[in-house]
Amino acid sequence: MIVKDVSVSLSKSYITAEVDFGNSFTITCVAEGGRVPHYLQLSHQKTGATSFNELILYDTDNSKTPDTVVVGDNTITITYSVTTTGHEDNGQYRCIAKNRVAANAEKELSAVGDVIVGM
């Protein structure tokens, strides 16, 4: 069986975007595959930090399906919203998706978007 690669995207309006302090924003992470991807993670690295912190994780291997995850026919969508933006929301947001292909091999792709909180 031919399996389509997993593709990942963040909300186009927030890839390297500035958000006014105190306003809200939403990041959407979408993974597609020939089969439903089995793993999707959204994480955040604050400006000046050296590592990413997990925000939302969908992982069928560990039976983890948060309420903010929607599973479609061949897609998974994570929606993450910040209602009142602060300087702690500055930084990179990363989405990682994994899909299994032939012989249980795994395909992994990621996308990163930057959010800058302005005054």
Image (spheres, helix red, strand yellow):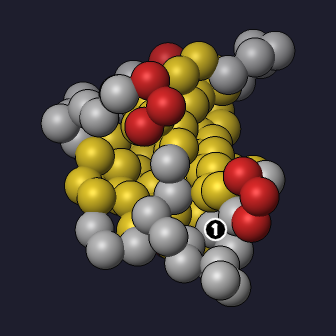
Count of marks placed on residues: 1
In this rendering, position of residue 25 left or right of residue 68 = right
Q: Residue furthest bottom?
A: 2
Residue under the point 77% across and 58% down: 103
Q: Measuring from the top left, give residue 108's x and y in whole percent.
A: 74, 53
Q: Measuring from the top left, give residue 15's x and y in whole percent.
A: 59, 61
**Picture quarter with the C terminus:** top left
Q: Amino acid at mark 1?
A: Val
Residue under the point 75% across and 17% down: 51
Foreground residue among 85 and 35 = 35
Q: Using the rendered image of the protein, determine whether residue 107 is visible from the camera's viewpoint.
A: no
Crowd band around label 1 with a 10 angstrom C-alpha radius: few (<14), some (14–19), many (20+): many
Q: Measuring from the top left, give residue 74's x and y in whole percent.
A: 40, 73
Relative to 6, residue 19 above or below: above
Q: Measuring from the top left, give residue 116's x and y in whole percent.
A: 57, 41
Foreground residue among 109 and 80 = 109
Relative to 31, residue 78 above or below: above
User: Element under label 1?
Assistant: loop
Q: Which residue is labeled 1 in the image?
A: 6
Residue under the point 65% across and 83% down: 1
Foreground residue among 12 and 84 = 12
Q: Using the rendered image of the protein, determine whether residue 40 is visible from the camera's viewpoint.
A: yes
Residue under the point 35% across and 28% down: 63
State the image quarter where residue 77 is shown: bottom left
In this rendering, position of residue 118 left or right of residue 112 = left
Foreground residue among 2 and 95 = 2
